[in-house]
Amino acid sequence: QVQLVESGGGLVQPGGSLRLSCAASGSIFSINAMGWYRQAPGTQRELVAVVTSGGTTNYADSVKGRSTISRDNAKNTVYLQMNSLKPEDTAVYYCNALIADWNLVEYDLWGQGTQVTVSS
């Protein structure tokens, strides 16, 4: 069984920084893309950033220049460093990954979500 476990959310003041982590564990053969999404109350879940297995990254315009996504393939972990945080960044942040297990079955997995609140 494969799962994603997130950490690093919390309360931060405007202009502050946070680093989110998401570790995949279980019977993992390979991990393709890994990414972060967020959902604020009353809105749809939206892409924040994604990184492919080859290291190519893509960011939402709203976070471009303020956030950096990275991954450690040896640890099956993806990170999201967020700087210059704004109140509009407040949301539940979800990790997502495309993972193949040793039976070569691919799963589109989601983490449980971690709350990020930007407020003074």
Image: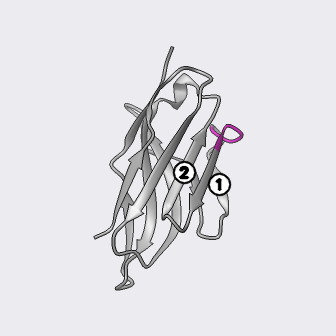
* Dot placed on the residue nearer the N-terminal end, 2 or 1: 1
Task: Find residue 115 and report its image quarter.
Answer: top left
Left or right of 68, for residue 44: left
Label 2 crowd (10 A; few <14 / some 14-19 / many >=20): many
Label 1 crowd (10 A; few <14 / some 14-19 / many >=20): some
Disc 2, SS: strand
Query: Label 2 to label 1, Cα distance in Å?
Result: 14 Å
The x, y position of residue 73, in whole percent, is 55, 67
Q: Residue at x 61, y 55 (%)?
A: 70
Q: Residue at x 67, y 63 (%)?
A: 56
Q: Residue at x 54, y 20 (%)?
A: 13
The x, y position of residue 50, in whole percent, is 57, 56
Magenta residues, as a range?
Answer: 63-67
Q: Main secondary structure of the magenta part?
A: loop
Left or right of 108, for residue 68: right
Task: Examine the rendered structure and indicate whether residue 39 appears above or below residue 79.
Answer: above
Give the labeled residue for mark 2.
79
Tell me the kind of residue under disc 2.
Tyr
Tell me the kind of residue under disc 1.
Asn
Q: Which mark is residue 58?
A: 1
Nearer-the-camera pick, 33 or 18: 18
The x, y position of residue 25, in whole percent, is 37, 65
Disc 1, SS: strand
